[in-house]
Image (cartoon, grey):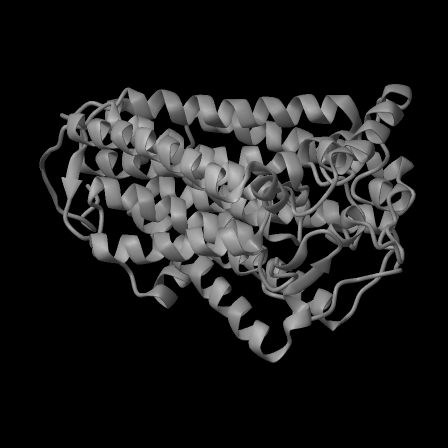
Amino acid sequence: MNQSAKWIDLGESGLPAVQPLRRFPFLTFLQRYPIFLLALGPPIFRAPIVGTDTSQAHFDPWNVFQVGWISLIALRAILRLASTRSILIPKQVRSILRLFFILGFLFVVSITYSPGRVISSEYCLLYFLTLICVVEFLVDAYRNPPNWMECLLQLRRISFLLFVLVLVTLIFNPKLVLQVIPGAGIRLLGGAVAPVALVCAIMAIVSAYCFLNSLESRVRSMQFFVIGVTGTAIMQSRGSDIALFATLAVLAIGFAKTRRRFAYVLISGFMASILLLGLVIGTIGGNRIWDIFNRGQDFANFKTASGRTTEWQFVIEYTLAHPEGMGYIAGIRRTHRVGGDTSMHALLNRSGGTDNSYVEILGDAGWIALALYLTMLAKVVALGWRLAIRYSPAAFAVEASAVHALRCALLLFLFYLICAMNASGFVIPMQAGFYYQNITIAIILGASASILIASRPRYVSMAG
């Protein structure tokens, strides 16, 4: 049984409430579970790439440092896996990992017709190195389950440190983290230091879950929540705002189902917000509010999502004629070189891309790859959701810890899935979204394995 937290009587939600969690020191945690080091990036303090053909091999000291960082973490994982006598993972988790490997194999095949074989090969290597880190974490966690909520709290801490780093960079070199976009003004995007929309949303979602379920000091949760929401707002991204709002709405509605008083507060707050919105619209004017939300763009530009839908249409039409895709990473970068363009889409994609993770996969390796990717995501959600809603209050304490983490991680995953509609970084190695998503998937799969161990005696005997 996991001894990292004490469990007290059951709450209305059916899950045990917990006292403040006892956690590893931050550096000790990273040493124990180095996969979380991938979330650090590490940050790159350089100006965005403009005018470079990123579909071909290119590097600088920052790239070497970043690849070396990932390689060292993966090398440790390989050595630990090599010394493991037997690997026991539930078949439900193995089936998802198998899809990961098959998808990677399709990326490798796409190297043969890629316009930049070297860059495609390099990214394929990084893809598999990351997958090895995920597997090693699951093998280790299967034998010795961690405090799963601690994993999410440490992920929040990393996000906070990266956001602080963005603010520090803003003081000394604002050009690295700010972007001036026509029609949108100045936006704190974070550049290559850290994606502000992602790290702030993680702080907000994890803190909101902890606040509602009393998993830590509510003052601490509220502080991180305010920081996260404020950071997301000043980033001025419609996609991130909508994704965060939708995720928090799902959390609030789910919690209201188990707490009658909270349900009354939620309904009252919703009605009050409608009245307040009507008052604001009547006072300020609907046109002015629309201009603020739309960042001064005309309706045609808004309708095409700042030019993104044009890019998506091109990729879909190309893959209808070439179902195998364009070649991993390099294909889309060759056809979507931004050069010195000054449009919003170009400024958001200095290295070339589609601003959509699903279209990115489609362009990388075709329709089969997209089908595998969507199937993999669906199986991750289905496994986590099934185990989260079937929780028995009489189960082990470690299962209660896992279920709390599983539900919170699923909320993060929901945010990623929505954000992936207007961001391609969730499927591109060496971008923060890719590592955050894979770490969250590892938490979902690991927590699911812990629940299976606790609920099925045959797994307990095998793990022992």
Q: In the displayed structure, does residue 362 sit left or right of residue 417? A: right
Q: Position of residue 402 (x, y in %)?
A: 29, 37
Q: Nearer the viewer, residue 145 or 307?
A: 307
The answer to whether residue 269 is visible is yes
Q: Which quarter of the figure is the N terminus placed in?
A: top left
* Residue at 86%, 19% in the rendered image: 320
Q: Position of residue 35 (x, y in %)?
A: 49, 53
Q: Is residue 122 above or below residue 289?
A: below
* Residue at 16%, 30% in the rendered image: 261
* Residue at 44%, 55% in the rendered image: 230
Q: Position of residue 222 (x, y in %)?
A: 29, 53
Q: Is residue 58 above or below residue 255?
A: below
Q: In the displayed structure, does residue 100 sit left or right of residue 313? A: left
Q: Position of residue 242 (x, y in %)?
A: 52, 37
* Residue at 52%, 69% in the rendered image: 167
Q: In the displayed structure, does residue 11 sit left or right of residue 437? A: left
Spot the residue most to the left.
Answer: 9
Classify residue 170 by image quadrant: bottom right
The answer to whether residue 144 is visible is no
Spot the residue most to the front.
Answer: 283
Q: In the displayed structure, does residue 101 sit left or right of residue 48? A: left
Q: Nearer the viewer, residue 10 or 36?
A: 10
Classify residue 268 by image quadrant: top left
| Number of numbered discs on residues | 0
Q: Nearer the viewer, residue 321 or 225?
A: 225
Q: Which quarter of the figure is the C terminus placed in?
A: top left
Classify residue 42 by image quadrant: bottom right
